[in-house]
Image: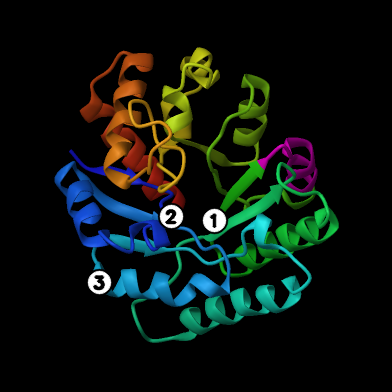
Amino acid sequence: MILTDTHTHIYSESFNEDQDEMMERAISSGVSRFFVPAIDSAYTEAMYAVEEKYPEQVFLMMGLHPTHVKENYEDELAHVEEEVKKRSESSSSKRFYAIGEIGIDLYWDKTFLKQQQDAFRRQIQLAKKYGLPIVIHGRDAFDEIFEILEEEKGEKLRGIFHCFSGTLEQAKKAISYNMKLGIGGVVTFKNGKIDRFLDQIALTDLVLETDAPYLAPTPYRGKRNESAYVLHVAKKLSSIYGISEEEIAEITTANSKEVFGI
């Protein structure tokens, strides 16, 4: 069984003490594909280090996380573009597999909404320029995100709506923009709500994720999340869709290949 974690921050400080053990646990659980989103330039070297350590399993993204859009966001966007350009022009086999995670987050702070909107729009355009998918972070900002996706929609727009926790209507709208829904620990929560309608969404529109070290699934809720726990997400989807965990793994891994091209 091949499981794919389409969103995991394995370079996080939370794993400084046991990164190798955490990766071994995940690989032993069947997770052999780790797609790793960026946050900002402060984490770039840590991302490259984990890619160097696990070249067969780790696939990097590049982008500026919306909660890290501050006064210096122009400098951060320049860093994103420079790194993407560098790898796209390099003869090395190392490349980025998406622009992410990008988007809008109005949960923590609305101070930089205009800058978040600008950064989101420009990074979508960067993804289109290099033929890459996008990975969207959206919290308390569905309307604002959909407004920009509507502007940018077209054949070149594709990707994943990471950590989807919206309504059925919002799920269908996200999918209409050529997005897969990233399903993680929230689907296992008693108050997560998405488990109530997920069976009305085609399994071909879903990918698995953890968002480790955040949002650990039940029975680990409130503790540090790690990629091995994506198995609990697969188990929950197996229950919702009435098919085996192996089939969930096979279909969602195929969906991740469709998005990332690998």
Image location of residue 38, percent across then percent down:
51, 63
Q: Which residue is mark 3?
A: 53
Q: How is the image coloured?
A: rainbow
User: What secondary structure is found at the residue carrying circle 3?
Assistant: helix
Would residue 161 appear left or right of 96 to someone viewing this image? right
| Mark before the other along the chain sequence, 1 or 2 | 1
Q: Residue at x 54, y 61 (%)?
A: 132
Query: Is 262 placed above or below 204 here?
Result: below
**Mark-to-mark CA distance, 3 and 1:** 25 Å
Q: Are marks 1 and 2 in contact (CB under 8 Å)?
A: yes
**Mark-to-mark CA distance, 3 and 2:** 21 Å
Q: Out of 9 and 7, give the one closest to the viewer.
A: 9
| Magenta residue check for 144 | yes
Q: Which residue is mark 2?
A: 260
Foreground disc of the pair 3, 2: 3
Image quarter in which the C terminus is found: bottom left
User: What secondary structure is found at the residue carrying circle 1?
Assistant: loop
Q: Which residue is mark 1?
A: 133
Image location of residue 80, percent across then percent down:
60, 74
User: What secondary structure is found at the residue carrying circle 2?
Assistant: helix
